[in-house]
Structure formats: structure tokens, C-alpha cells
């Protein structure tokens, strides 16, 4: 039995599902109108339409993901899944179209968010939880394989025999003397302490209080009361001020820093619903087997006899109408399925005869038809010129979304489920679904029997010798003589996937990803992006924008095979940014969110392994074979610029960093839509590489900048909490975020770890943290100067404008911006070295003075 809370939760998620389809119906009406949209001439209006659709689809995506995760009805979840994947694919299509129209990977939609009354959190791309949940068994097996191989790699440490050291007589005497002197010292100190206490007690007893001393003692009492009243009033005022700030929403309630009992209850209910999902799924699978058996045994013979009678009746009607028995339809044409259409025997015979004539004359007429169609198309193009303007690209998902919405409207929208409190599967729906599959199976069996029966009738009645038609023989021969694609040689035919996995782990080419999530990559929303764009200023993306782009280009396609096959294929992606901005963390987060394998083909990791040309081919073959068979997989190339060095440094010539430059791009071309494999490169020094080769290899280049003020504020707060600290009013996070401009997240982690030691954490109750404590270790680290970041931006724009194959370059990227950035970079790059030579003590003094003066400004 289910309580009222469970029933209410069922209705809540059903309502969420229904609201998502209601919104989806409105979007489908906009995207699939009866009359196609006219081309839009205004580029701004067209982009606003794309952004609005993009935001609406994200809201539907969030609703469907929540419903799919919590609805426990197995048949409902099977209806939600294709729609959910279709929405994901449509979001990626719109993102790709926005990139092509705005010439940028990052988009700012503050105005649309404001018009729709949404918050920046509503634009976050949710990571579907079923990516990991539905592959839990596979991931557990992979972890077990990792553990087995790593345990075998550990050297067997032999226990060392205990060493017995003999103590000399002099050493023993010295230890005894030290202990005896310490004992005597403690006794003497105790004796002197008692003497001093007794002497002080005797003095107080014999002394008499003078008149002045008595007056001072009497005056102290009201003064103490006044001091206490002032202290109590200040404390009360401070408490009232804090409550007012919490009420106004300008400060966080300390009680909310920990999960409330209600939050814990909700999390517990969600976990229980996921457990019930598994139970209902098992019952559903068992019911499918029993329903199929029942249909085959009970309804199967009746269906079989009915089909035979219908086909025999068709034989007789055709003979009465045409004077001879017809030819039985081939299995490639659908077999007897085409006989059950609403057509007369004469029409069916004419269609079959027409098909045979078409097959016979297909080769002769094919070329002529192609020429005629080409002439007609040319004439149409000349007669009807397309109207100038912007049009949306055709979508591969709108038909799937429309089909899924129709299924929901026809079956589930108005379904009465008052008796199905437990949300178990419905047997009648299973029968309707499986009855069609069984009819197809039975029809194939009936076709074989009726072909033989028709041949016997022709021999007996018409005296015709039935043989295989020449057309069919020609078809078979043509299929055999078709062109065959050349298959790559499998260099490891005689080896199992387990042995290849073990060897790659032993060679450290296959690694276990770190346990980090994409949400752990902290960063706040960029609130001034649209304003800067309107002023013709290209804003630097925030870390929140980077997180969104990685989720769209890497996580969603790798997590869903259906999405990966249809969306614009991204084979490789380059993360470029200063050292410490979290590039490696993003690579590990992609693997954790999708359950992907992590292969490390960094030049330093590959050096010295599998030497020679044959060894290199074997290594790449093994890596990509295991990556395809155990997909999804991520192939990480750290220090990606080394593979495309303009000139290899002398100290790296022995490592041969350009070893993969020729062979890896060839293998990358063989990746298809069905291969969930992504190559991710990371670099902090792209200007040392040949930009033309680098940009040709990577489909997407994502620039990761230094964190802005909002992101730094969030980072300081979360990092201090994570390392055992507690932000209080004494800690001015706003000032700390302001003075840490130019420092990367890696620098901040380093500073927090140096300040929050075990001893400092124990002192937090008596001595709260202050911003000044973080200044000194921060000043010892060289920041990333603005000129260095501008250099990365220049290199990115060189890639986009200098390579003809790049789609953004062909459409006229923001060239004035590129020239401006390059001039700024050339002028100011010489100042970087001089800035680094400044004394760190000067930075510390200036920062401390700023912190000291800040409270005065606030009070004023």
C-alpha cells in the first residue's frame, strides 16, 4: 500500500511531464507551421528568435529530465526517453546555429532571461542522471578491472626484519639523570608555588582598606554596570541588523548552511523512488515475457489461420479477375503486408507488374531521368529565385519530437489512472505493442508457406513451371558485385578486450579519472555580456559560460548514443587558457559525468613507449579499438601545443613530442557518428605551436579566461568552506575578490591550503578569519597579467581568421576586434617582464593599506 505522500509525488511528476509537453506543443507549432517562415532580413531579430527557442528548450529539458529521473512507471519512462533525447539534440542544433550566426562560441542572453522572468540558474544545462545510473553495472565491472590490474602492478613489499639496538651504559645513565632532574624540578616548582600563595594570603588578611580605596571600589560598581549595558546593547543591535539583512535577502541565514530536515526528507524520498523504479522495471520485463508467450500460444494460431485465409482469398480473386494466379510479393517489398492494404486484386496485380517493369528498365531510364531532373531543377532555379534573408537550418529531431508528443497526447494525456496507485505497468499496452511484433514474425512464416502453396496451385491448375525470376537473380548478383569498403587491418585479432585493457593500464595510457563533477567547476554568470556586446565590446567569457559550453559539446553527446549520431559531430576539442584555470579538471569532469574511459596520449606520457613506426601504429590501434568497444571514451592530449611545435626545443628533442602529428589526424578522420569518442586537448602556450595545423586538428577551440569578480567571490567562499573554514562578517570576501584580480583558481586553492592549516582551523572559534591573512601568500604568487590573456585571445582569433576551412572565418569574424586586441598585445607585452620584477613586499603593503581603509569607507 502507498501513503498519500507517495500518491501526491506521482501526481506532481505527472503534472511536470504534462507541463513540459504543453510547452513543447507551443514550440512545435512555431517551428513546424503550416506555411514556412519567410526569410528574416534583420540579423538581430533572427538571433533573438534563436535565443528564445534555445531558452525555452532548456526549460523543457530540465522538466523532462526531472520527470524521467523520478517517474517510476516503466512504460511512461519509455515514452519520455526519446522526447528527452530529442530535446537535447534540438538544443545542440540551436547552439550550433547560434555559433554560425553570431561568430562566437559564447552567447549572452541577459535581455531574454529578464523578459521571461528567469534567473541565471535556469539557463544551467542539467546533466541527465541516467547517464551514470543506467551504466552502473558496466562502470562497476570497469572499476573492478582497474583494481585488479593496479593490485597486480604493486610491488610485493617484503617485511623488513626488526632491528634490535643495544643501549650502552653511558646512554642509560644519561637518561636516568635527565629523568631525575626533571622530577626534582617539578617538585621544587610546586613547593615554591604553595609558598607564594600562602604569603599573598597573609598580606591580604593584615592589610586595611583606606578611604580612597573604598571610594574607588564603590565607584567601580555603576561603571561596570554601564560598561555591561553598552556591551549588551551593541550585541543586541548587531543581532537585529543581521536579522534585517537576512529578511531583506542580503545575507544568508546560518541555519540554511546545513541541509534542513525537509531537504533530507526530499532526498530520501527521491532515492526510494529510484529503488522502486528498478523493482517496477524487473516486473515489467517479466510481464513482457509472459505476454509474448501468451500471445504466441493463444492468439498466434488464430492470427496465422486468418492470414492464410486472406491470402488464399486474394489468390482466387486475382485468378477470377486476371485469368491467372499472381506472383507472390518478394520479402524485400514487404511480403504479404502489402496485400492487406485497401486495394482491389486488379490494382495489386497492376502494381506488381509495374514494379517488375520498373526494375527491368531502371538502369536504362536512370541516366535519362537524372538528366531531365537536372534540367528541370536548373529551370526552376532560374525562374524562382530564393528570397534573400536568414533561414533556420533543417532539423533532424523535430519529427521525432512531434511523434513523441502525439504518443503522449493519444495514450497518456487523458488516461484514467485512479486505480493504478502503485504506478505499475499496464498489461493491455504491452499486448498492443507486442501483438504487432508477433504479427510480423507470423507473417514471415506464413509467407514461406503460402509461396510454396501458390507454386503447387500453379503446377496443378495452370501447368506452369515456376522458377526464380531473372530480375531477382540480377538483383542478388548486383548486390554481390557492389562496392566494398576497405576495412582497416585489425592488428590485435587474436587478443581479447580484457588483455588490451590490462596492457593499456599497465602502460599508463588508460587512467582512472578523478572524482569531480562539472558543478564543482565554480563560476558565476556573466551579467554584463549583452551590455558590452551592444557597445561593440567583446566580453571575456565567465567560467560559468565555459562550464555550459563543455556540457553542450562534450557531456551531452557522449552521454547519449542517439544524440551523438544525429547532432553536428564534434570529434576534437581544445581547451586553451593560462595554467591553473581548471583545464585538466574539466577533462576529468567530462569522464565522471558520462562514465567515459580516460586515455592519456600526452606527449610526455607517450615518450619512450612503443618505439618505432610499427610500435606507434600498434599503440594508436589499441587505444582507439578499446575506446570504440568500451565507449564512451575521452582521449586526452595534455600540452597539445607540443604535438604541433614550430621548432622543438633542444631539451625536448629526445622526447620526440611531434611523434603523433602524422598518424593521429588520420585516425581521427575514421571516427563516425556511432563512435562515442572525443579527443580533448589542453594547452597554456598555443603560440609556440603551428596555429594552422593546431586549428585544423581541433573542431572546437574553447578559450578559458581568468575568473572575473563574481566568479572569484564564489570561489573564495566555497574554497574556504571546503577546507574547513567558516566565512564570517570579519572576512571581507568582496575585498578579497577585488584584490585577487588576475589570479587563477589554482592560485586560490594554493593560498587557501597554505592559510587553513590544522592549527588555524582549531583557532577559528576564538580568532575568525580575516582577508589580511590571505594577502601575504597571495602576493608571493605571480598573477596572470592581462597581456598574457590577450595573447591567448589573439591566438584564438588567428586560428579562426587564418584558416580557410574554419566556418567562422568565411562569414567575416569581428576583424576590428581582432586588430584592436593584437595591437594592444604588441604594445603592452614588453611591460610584463618589468611588472614581474616588482617587489612582493610592495604589493603586500599596498593591499594591506587598502584593506585597512575599506571599513572606514563603508562606515562613511
Image (cartoon, helix red, strand yellow):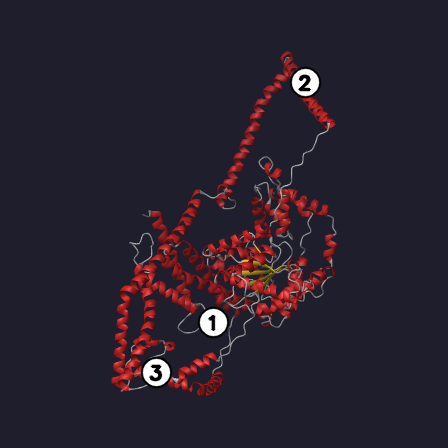
In this view, the residue in front, 255 or 181, is: 181
In this view, the residue in front, 82 or 672, is: 672
Which quadrant would the C terminus be assigned to in this image?
A: top right
From the top left corner, tell me how far across and down residue 234 is, in percent.
55, 34
Where does label 2 land, which residue? 192
Marking on residue 352:
3
> Mark 3 or 1 closer to N-term?
3
Residue at disc 2, secondary structure: helix
Residue at disc 1, secondary structure: loop
> Mark 2 or 1 closer to N-term?
2
Whether pointer 3 and pointer 1 mark residues with C-beta atoms closer than 8 Å, the reply is no
From the top left corner, tell me how far across and down residue 455 is, in percent.
31, 81
From the top left corner, tell me how far across and down residue 748 is, in percent.
62, 49
Could you tell whether 676 is left or right of 212 in the image?
Answer: left
Residue at disc 3, secondary structure: helix
In this view, the residue in front, 5 or 208, is: 5
Marking on residue 806:
none
Q: Look at discs 2 and 1 and give the one toward the viewer.
A: 2
Could you tell whether 302 is left or right of 747 in the image?
Answer: left
Q: Is residue 112 visible?
A: yes
Spatial separation of the CA atoms under disc 2 and disc 1? 96 Å
Q: Is residue 515 visible?
A: no
Residue 2, relative to residue 173: is it above or below? Answer: below
> Mark 2 or 3 closer to N-term?
2
Marking on residue 394:
1
Spatial separation of the CA atoms under disc 3 and disc 1? 36 Å
Amino acid at each position: 500500500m502507498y501513503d498519500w505522500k507517495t500518491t501526491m509525488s506521482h501526481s506532481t511528476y505527472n503534472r511536470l511531464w504534462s507541463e513540459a509537453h504543453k510547452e513543447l506543443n507551443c514550440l512545435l507549432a512555431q517551428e513546424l507551421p503550416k506555411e514556412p517562415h519567410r526569410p528574416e532580413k534583420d540579423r538581430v531579430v533572427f538571433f533573438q528568435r534563436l535565443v528564445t527557442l534555445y531558452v525555452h528548450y532548456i526549460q523543457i529539458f530540465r522538466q523532462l529530465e526531472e520527470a524521467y529521473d523520478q517517474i517510476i512507471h516503466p512504460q511512461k519512462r519509455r515514452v519520455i526517453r526519446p522526447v528527452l533525447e530529442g530535446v537535447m539534440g534540438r538544443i545542440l542544433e540551436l547552439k550550433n546555429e547560434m555559433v554560425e550566426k553570431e561568430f562566437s562560441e559564447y552567447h549572452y542572453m541577459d535581455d531574454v532571461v529578464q523578459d521571461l522572468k528567469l534567473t541565471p540558474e535556469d539557463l544551467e544545462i542539467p546533466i541527465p542522471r541516467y547517464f551514470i545510473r543506467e551504466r552502473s553495472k558496466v562502470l562497476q565491472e570497469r572499476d573492478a578491472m582497474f583494481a585488479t590490474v593496479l593490485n597486480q602492478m604493486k610491488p610485493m613489499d617484503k617485511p623488513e626484519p626488526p632491528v634490535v639496538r643495544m643501549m650502552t651504559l653511558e646512554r642509560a645513565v644519561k637518561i636516568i639523570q635527565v629523568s631525575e632532574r626533571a622530577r626534582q624540578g617539578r617538585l621544587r616548582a610546586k613547593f615554591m608555588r604553595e609558598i607564594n600563595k600562602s604569603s599573598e594570603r597573609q598580606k591580604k588578611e593584615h592589610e586595611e582598606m583606606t578611604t580612597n580605596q573604598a571610594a574607588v571600589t564603590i565607584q567601580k560598581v555603576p561603571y561596570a554596570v554601564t560598561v555591561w549595558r553598552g556591551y549588551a546593547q551593541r550585541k543586541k543591535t548587531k543581532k537585529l541588523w543581521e536579522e534585517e539583512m537576512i529578511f531583506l535577502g542580503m545575507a544568508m541565514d546560518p541555519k540554511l548552511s546545513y541541509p534542513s530536515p525537509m531537504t533530507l526528507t526530499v532526498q530520501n524520498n527521491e532515492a526510494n523512488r529510484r529503488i522502486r523504479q528498478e523493482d517496477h522495471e524487473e516486473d515489467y520485463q517479466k510481464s513482457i515475457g509472459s505476454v509474448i508467450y501468451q500471445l504466441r500460444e493463444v492468439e498466434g494460431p488464430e492470427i496465422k489461420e486468418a492470414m492464410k485465409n486472406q491470402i488464399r482469398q486474394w489468390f482466387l480473386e486475382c485468378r477470377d479477375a486476371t485469368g491467372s494466379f499472381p506472383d507472390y510479393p518478394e520479402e524485400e517489398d514487404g511480403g504479404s503486408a502489402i496485400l492487406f492494404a485497401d486495394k482491389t486484386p486488379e490494382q495489386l496485380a497492376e502494381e506488381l507488374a509495374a514494379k517488375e517493369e520498373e526494375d527491368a528498365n531502371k538502369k536504362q531510364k536512370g541516366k535519362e531521368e537524372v538528366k531531365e531532373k537536372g534540367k528541370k531543377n536548373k529551370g526552376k532555379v532560374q525562374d524562382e529565385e530564393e528570397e534573400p534573408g536568414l533561414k533556420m537550418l533543417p532539423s533532424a529531431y523535430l519529427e521525432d519530437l512531434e511523434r513523441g508528443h502525439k504518443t503522449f497526447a493519444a495514450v497518456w494525456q487523458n488516461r484514467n489512472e485512479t486505480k493504478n496507485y502503485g504506478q505499475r505497468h499496464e498489461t493491455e499496452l504491452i499486448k498492443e505493442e507486442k501483438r504487432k511484433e508477433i504479427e510480423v514474425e507470423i507473417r514471415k512464416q506464413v509467407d514461406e508457406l503460402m509461396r510454396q502453396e501458390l507454386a503447387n496451385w500453379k503446377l496443378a491448375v495452370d501447368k506452369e513451371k515456376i522458377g526464380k525470376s531473372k530480375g531477382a537473380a540480377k538483383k542478388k548478383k548486383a548486390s554481390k558485385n557492389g562496392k566494398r569498403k576497405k576495412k582497416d587491418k585489425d592488428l590485435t585479432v587474436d587478443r581479447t578486450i580484457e588483455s588490451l585493457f590490462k596492457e593499456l593500464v599497465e602502460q599508463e595510457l588508460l587512467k582512472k579519472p578523478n572524482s569531480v563533477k562539472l558543478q564543482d567547476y565554480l563560476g558565476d554568470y556573466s551579467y554584463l555580456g549583452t551590455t558590452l556586446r551592444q557597445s561593440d565590446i567583446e566580453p571575456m567569457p565567465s567560467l560559468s559560460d565555459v562550464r555550459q559550453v563543455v556540457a553542450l559539446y562534450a557531456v551531452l553527446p557522449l552521454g547519449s548514443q542517439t544524440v551523438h549520431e544525429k547532432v553536428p559531430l564534434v570529434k576534437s576539442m581544445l581547451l586553451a587558457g593560462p595554467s591553473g584555470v581548471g583545464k585538466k579538471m574539466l577533462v576529468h569532469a567530462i569522464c565522471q559525468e558520462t562514465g567515459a574511459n580516460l586515455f592519456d596520449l600526452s606527449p610526455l606520457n607517450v615518450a619512450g613507449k612503443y618505439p618505432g613506426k610499427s610500435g606507434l601504429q600498434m599503440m594508436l590501434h589499441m587505444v582507439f579499438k578499446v575506446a570504440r568497444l568500451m565507449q564512451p571514451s575521452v582521449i586526452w592530449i595534455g600540452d597539445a601545443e607540443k604535438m604541433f611545435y614550430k621548432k622543438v626545443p633542444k631539451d625536448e628533442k629526445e622526447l620526440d613530442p611531434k611523434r603523433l602529428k602524422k598518424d593521429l589526424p588520420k585516425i581521427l578522420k575514421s571516427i563516425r557518428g556511432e563512435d562515442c569518442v572525443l579527443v580533448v586537448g589542453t594547452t597554456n602556450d598555443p603560440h609556440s605551436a603551428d596555429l594552422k595545423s593546431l586549428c585544423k586538428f581541433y573542431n572546437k577551440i574553447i578559450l578559458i579566461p581568468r575568473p572575473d569578480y563574481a566568479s572569484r567571490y564564489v570561489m573564495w567562499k566555497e574554497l574556504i568552506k571546503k577546507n574547513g573554514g567558516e566565512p564570517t562578517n570579519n572576512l571581507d570576501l568582496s575585498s578579497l575578490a577585488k584584490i585577487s584580480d588576475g589570479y587563477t583558481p589554482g592560485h586560490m586553492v594554493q593560498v587557501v591550503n597554505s592559510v587553513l592549516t590544522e592549527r588555524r582551523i582549531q583557532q577559528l572559534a576564538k580568532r575568525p578569519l580575516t582577508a589580511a591573512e590571505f594577502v601575504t601568500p597571495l602576493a608571493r604568487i605571480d598573477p596572470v597579467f592581462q597581456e598574457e590573456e590577450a595573447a591567448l585571445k589573439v591566438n584564438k582569433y588567428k586560428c579562426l581568421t587564418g584558416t580557410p576551412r574554419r566556418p567562422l572565418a568565411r562569414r567575416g569574424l569581428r576583424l576590428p576586434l581582432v586588430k584592436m586586441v593584437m595591437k594592444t598585445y604588441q604594445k603592452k607585452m614588453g611591460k610584463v617582464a618589468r611588472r614581474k620584477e616588482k617587489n612582493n613586499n610592495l604589493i603586500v603593503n599596498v593591499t594591506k593599506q587598502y584593506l585597512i581603509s575599506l571599513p572606514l569607507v563603508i562606515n562613511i
